Image (spheres, grey):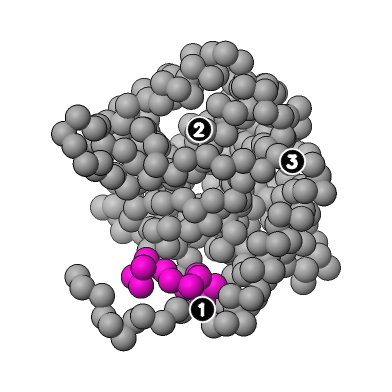
Amino acid sequence: MKPDPRDWRPTATRARLEQRAAALRETRAFFAERRLLEVDTPQLVRHAVTDVNLHSFEVRLDGAEHAPRFLHTSPEYAMKRLLAAGSGDIWQLCHVFRGEEQGPLHNGEFALIEWYRVGWTMTQLMAEVAALVQRLAPALAARPVSYLSYAEAIRQALGVDPLSGSDAALRQAAQEQGFDAGLVRGCTRDELLDLLMGARVGPTLGRLGLCFVHRYPASQAALGQLDPDDPRVALRFELYCEGVELANGFQELASATEQRARFEADNRERERRGLPRREADVLLLAALEAGLPACAGVAVGFDRVLLLATGAQQLSDVMAFPVDRA
């Protein structure tokens, strides 16, 4: 579809662009004060992610000899290679790209703040995430910060235990929440949990202030460690405020063997869903084999934080040009 010439103007006002520029300055000051090294990794990468919930944009380079490349969905893999090479604490603010994400809270291209703390626990990192968000959105500093396990969040909202409850109980909860019975019957357990958390539980979280949800089911560990005290759950957290997800963090997995197995499990699930297989990132696996230091890492959606800080209603209000005007 050709662009409409009338859409040449930015969607954000001059005042909002000034607020965005100020938030960028505050972000850099925040990490400079903490002496983290700012890094800059490639946005065009060799490997798409295997995660079934993320969709990588493919880029074809000129010349038949070039294999397809992909726009990164996160700088995580490259940053872990830096960590394995001895970088120490690092951070970056970059644009990332995710297909099939469009709406008031979604844009196919958005700004992400990602950082890693060597030797830190997930708990320590959650406190630093709260400090950054409160600095960028000062009105939140006067509001409480709460911590809730994933199991508690689901139980309180839906009355079902996501760890020990049966698949039938989860399907019943989904139907009670208004989801189509046919859709629910065709869902795997993780798909049911994603449906319930994303559409019903998440939007209720963080109404009083920042709310961290931690210890997600082990099947949703992604690139995080399992909890040694309870292997049913992963050392993973997300941050919500006003029903909006702002961050996703982990106590990072350092085992190349386990990560390779998870990539393969992702591909089996991709095949089940009719999605293309994705080659595992061999450079990340080599870095893990060389030795990733014990660390915790997190990604924070800069545009969503700015949305809360400014009182804007949708991401296009805080971006110069969303994808439909790019």
Q: Do the residues labelled 2 and 3 touch (CB within 8 Å)?
A: no
The amino acid marked with disc number 3 is: Leu
Residue 83: x percent and y percent?
63, 27
Examine the rendering and report whether any part of residue 200 can be seen: yes
Give the image quarter of residue 255. Answer: top right
How crowded pointer 2 is (Cα within 10 Å; few <14, some 14-19, many 20+) is rated as many
| Nearer-N-terminus badge (2/3) | 3
- Viewer-proximal residue, 46 or 261? 46
> Which quarter of the figure is the C terminus placed in?
bottom left
- Residue 315: say if magenta: yes
Q: Which element is circle 3 on?
A: loop
Vertical side of 289 occupied by 265: above or below: below
Examine the rendering and report whether any part of residue 151 can be seen: no
Give the image quarter of residue 321. Answer: bottom left
Q: Tell me which segment is drawn in magenta.
A: 313-326
Give the image quarter of residue 244. Answer: bottom right
- Viewer-proximal residue, 196 or 100? 100
The amino acid marked with disc number 1 is: Ala
Taking the view exactly as shown, the residue that stands out farthest to the front is 63
Query: Which numbered marker is on residue 262?
Result: none
The residue labelled by disc 1 is: 12
Query: Which numbered marker is on residue 36?
Result: 3
Residue 173: x percent and y percent?
45, 52
| Nearer-N-terminus badge (2/1) | 1
The residue labelled by disc 2 is: 77
The amino acid marked with disc number 2 is: Tyr
Q: In this view, does 311 lie to the left or right of 132?
A: left
